[in-house]
Image (cartoon, helix red, strand yellow):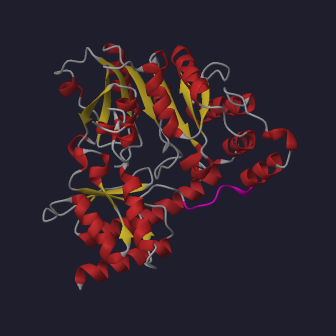
Amino acid sequence: MPTLVNRQARRMNSLGEYFFSRAHKKIDQLASTGRTIINLGIGSPDLAPSPLVIKELAQKASDSSMHAYPSYSGLLKFRTEIANWYQREFGVKIDPQNMVQPTSGSKEGIVFTTLALVNPGEEVLIPNPGFATYERAAIIAGAIPRMYSLDRENGYQPSFESLEKTDLSKVKLMWINYPHNPTGSTASIKQLEEIVKFAKKHSIILVSDNPYSHISFGRNHESSVLEIPGALDIAVELNSLSKTYNMAGWRLGWVVGNPKLMKAIAAIYSNIETGIFNPIQYAGVKALQLPQAFISERNEIYRKRSIIATEIAKIIGCETYETKASLYVWAKLPQKVVNAEEFCFNLLENTGVFITPGTAFGSNGDGYIRIALCQSEEVLLKAKHMIEEYLTS
């Protein structure tokens, strides 16, 4: 008979440990031996937030009145600034009173949104390849993850023709993510219109995860699905300050969208969370008020890094693609590489450079790698030299 401590919840049989948690244990183990490790795996910006944002945090944190429990619904000033940002950046009108829920980054927003909107046994459409948390959130909610295939030939866009050949009657929610993690693919307004049309036709709640909206190499920013007429009838969108304003460790984001859907998300939030430290929200207001120059200058840094990251992929023998947006270079491994995860961990062991295998993002990532742009050009060049030296020795 199993002991009490071995009787974990059945959902854990499908959940398992998060890939990057496993990877970091291996990285930490090697680093503990004195090895120099260059992590090109995770998309955690290495660049600093604006000094204005840091100053705002310090000033507000020194105010003794700021250390009580914060509001469940978030500061009205922060919610209002999010609404202002959506109007300015996307031309979308958001009511800060009933269409915004601040969150501690996007990841918890993904889980709370799923818990609020999906019943056990209902299906969730999840992109493959895609961010693993969409699937994990569905499992936690007792829902059924249902992958929809994205491939290079189709520009990593959904194939509605394929989806409509299947039974969609149990599908409650569909995740989209453009700019796309891990591939960096983007969606045009026309493509977003098709996605909204599909969701409406089949009475599916549409959730857009849009944290890379302002990491774009050809324009000021990419689009929001909420720009599409009628999208607010069936959609919500997540975003955060992590990537756009170099504030990943601050854990500050939001969900915005349809008021009825947002009411459910806010209710889940209030039953699990106790709000976000107010000084961080005030700093978030300051970040959202930063001029376009802050983003444009940062994006130029990432663009230059993407050139070196592409060179690294080519040294490995990969087929590479133009990176239009996001923090990553996505590349197809040579056919001689049978197992992407084994290849990446072997590369880590032999060079000290960690690159993410595409399988971390689903079965359609098999045979691919993702290189993050979150190290300086100097460090990227060092990684390039280390890999080149190993592969040619």
Q: Where is residue 282 in the image (x, y as percent from the top left)?
A: 74, 41
- Residue occupying image coordinates x 50% and y 19%: 232
- Residue occupying image coordinates x 31% and y 50%: 360
- Residue occupying image coordinates x 26% and y 51%: 359
Q: Considering depth in this image, is 12 or 2 the residue closer to the camera?
A: 2
Whether 251 is drawn above or below 77: the answer is below
Residue 196 covered by magenta stretch: no
State the extent of the magenta-drawn residues as a range: 46-51
Q: Position of residue 14 (x, y in %)?
A: 29, 37
Asked if residue 340 shows in the view, the reply is yes
Asked if residue 92 shows in the view, the reply is no
Quadrant for residue 88, please give it: top right
Residue 47 covered by magenta stretch: yes
Number of marks: 0
Whether 313 is drawn above or below 33: the answer is above
Quadrant for residue 278, please give it: top right
Task: Check the image and name the residue furthest to the front.
Answer: 1
Q: Considering depth in this image, is 76 or 286 the residue closer to the camera?
A: 76
- Residue occupying image coordinates x 60% and y 31%: 273
Q: Where is residue 269 in the image (x, y as percent from the top left)?
A: 57, 27
Give the quadrant of the C terminus: bottom left
Magenta highlight: main SS: loop
Give the quadrant of the N terminus: top left
Whether 237 is drawn above or below 264: the answer is below
Q: Position of residue 180 (x, y in %)?
A: 38, 43
Task: Answer with left or right where residue 279 lies relative to residue 122.
Answer: right
Whether 148 is drawn above or below 354: the answer is above
